[in-house]
Amino acid sequence: MRVRWDGVGVRVGDATLLAELDLDVASGEILGLVGPNGSGKSTALRCVYRALRPSTGVVWLDDLALPTQSLLDSARSVAALTQDSHAELDFTVAEVVALGRAPHLRGNQALGERDQQLCAQAMRRTDVTHLAQRSVLTLSGGERQRVLIARALAQDPKVLVLDEPTNHLDLRHQLGLLRFLRGCGLTVLIALHDLNLAAATCDRIAVLARGQLVAHGQPVEVVDPELVRTVFGTKAAVVTHPDSGVPQLLYDVTANPEGTS
């Protein structure tokens, strides 16, 4: 499913959180949103999964403007893992993952065979099958994060929105998730702080700063020392990964940040 931000802006009082964003994401493409804290990444994603209503512009899913769709219809197409996702109720892992099927069921309708298969598949993909009968309240932060990702996958969406999905994940599960995204065939919108993970995972990267789109293109076009210095205030060198050919940044932690002494 194609996703397009068409002049999308978000204002709260006198503050502009996002300024007339224009971005077009092809079906099956992975778009990475990167930028400093407060740059507008989460705001842009919230407009897609309808946690925010844009002040200007519109988000399109294929040829349908998002506001013309019911919340239920858009929930059948778009699944999201948000930064503030949490599971505080004493549900089992299996019960939390099954919540992903809610947009496809009526009322208290029981899970059908296909629903159960999708939930089982999502738990396998995120390596939480062995936790199925555990209470989510007993899990570590990383385990909970994987359960919430499984819930989003169980929704069987066409568009997967992930806001900092690697938070709390150990290295093995970070890489496992990103490898899965590369081959899942879904349209993926993902906000990441790690520029190297973004370059290795995404087809294209959009760089935001102060609510503005400042760069956009393939990783080789965007991962640039001058851009990193300008946007992040950090010095970095770019090297090419010997196996994948993907540009990667090397940082010198002994160097002073830009503007300090």
Image (spheres, helix red, strand yellow):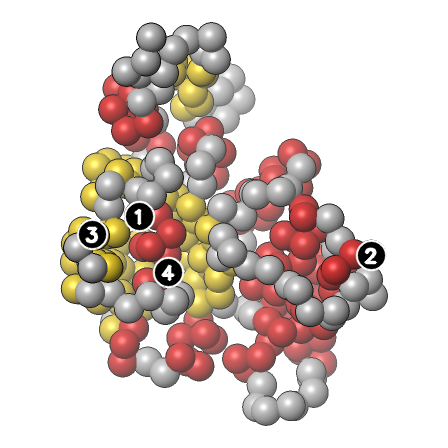
Residue count near mark 2 (Cα–Cα under 10 Å), binned few <14, some 14–19, many ≥20:
few
Residue 89, image x, y percentages? 69, 69
Residue 213, image x, y percentages? 22, 42
Distance in Å between CA atoms under marks 4 and 2:
32 Å
Describe the element under mark 3 as helix, strand or loop: strand
Figure check: 79 above or below 189: below
Residue 12, image x, y percentages? 24, 59
Image quadrant occupied by the C terminus = top left
Residue 40 — which label?
1
Asked whether 63 or 127 is in front, the reply is: 127
Residue identifier under label 3? 16
Residue identifier under label 2? 130
Describe the element under mark 2 as helix, strand or loop: helix
The nearer-to-camera label among 2 and 3 is 3
Question: Residue, x 25% and y 51% (percent of image)?
Answer: 17
What amino acid is at disc 2? His
Distance in Å between CA atoms under marks 2 and 3:
45 Å
What amino acid is at disc 3? Thr
What amino acid is at disc 4? Arg
Figure check: 31 above or below 214: below
Residue 242, image x, y percentages? 51, 17
Describe the element under mark 1 as helix, strand or loop: loop
The nearer-to-camera label among 3 and 1 is 3
Asked whether 55 or 153 is in front, the reply is: 55
Residue identifier under label 4? 46
Q: Closer to the N terminus: mark 2 or mark 3?
A: 3
Residue 205 visible: no
Describe residue 163's horizontal placement relative to residue 102 as left or right.
Answer: left
